[in-house]
Amino acid sequence: MIGKTIEMRRLSDGAVYRFEAQPSGLDGLPRFKRADKDIWILRDEKFGWIVWDAQDKALMGRPWEIAIEDQGDLPPECDWVSRKGANSFVYRLVFV
């Protein structure tokens, strides 16, 4: 069974960021908030599942190789890519 916590595990150095399930948004889909910042994993109408920085109102990451039409009602457990400034990172999304 899929848990209510997501870990984003950075492949380059092993850093782990935890996201906890939050009440559903207006779309009725689950969303997850990072434990230490106002950063969310949520479903966007145009981009599918994304990592969203609510403070900066910026798209920070998304699944690497799963097309939007193939994404289900939960964020896909796969590799995600992110951008922070001039740097890019690869993460593995895992439900725990």
Image: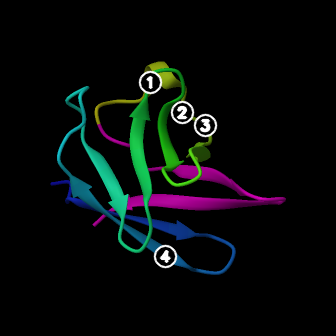
The Cα atoms of the two marked residues, 4 and 1, are separated by: 26 Å
| Residue highlighted by disc 1 | 70
Q: CA distance from mark 2 to mark 4?
A: 22 Å
Scheme of colours in the image: rainbow
Mark 2 against mark 4, which lies toward the viewer? 4
Marks 4, 3: nearer the viewer: 4
- Quadrant location of residue 88? bottom right
Mark toward the start of the polypeptide (4 vs 1): 4
Q: Residue at x 44, y 22 (%)?
A: 45
- Of residue 2 and residue 8, the one placed in the foreground of this image is 8
Residue carrying label 3:
65
Q: Which residues are magenta?
A: 74-96
Residue designated by label 2: 66
Residue 13 is left or right of residue 55, and the answer is right
Task: Mark 4 or mark 3: name the one nearer the start of the chain.
Answer: 4
For the view shown, which residue lies furthest in the front direction?
Answer: 55
Mark 4 and mark 3: Cα distance apart in space: 21 Å
Marks 2/3: CA distance? 4 Å
Crowd band around label 3 with a 10 angstrom C-alpha radius: few (<14), some (14–19), many (20+): few
Magenta-span inclusion, residue 81 = yes
The residue carrying mark 4 is: 16
Is disc 4 surrounded by few (<14), some (14 to 19) or many (20+) residues within 10 Å? some
Under tag 3, what secondary structure? loop
Kindly check if marks 2 and 4 are in contact, taking CB atoms under 8 A apart as contact: no
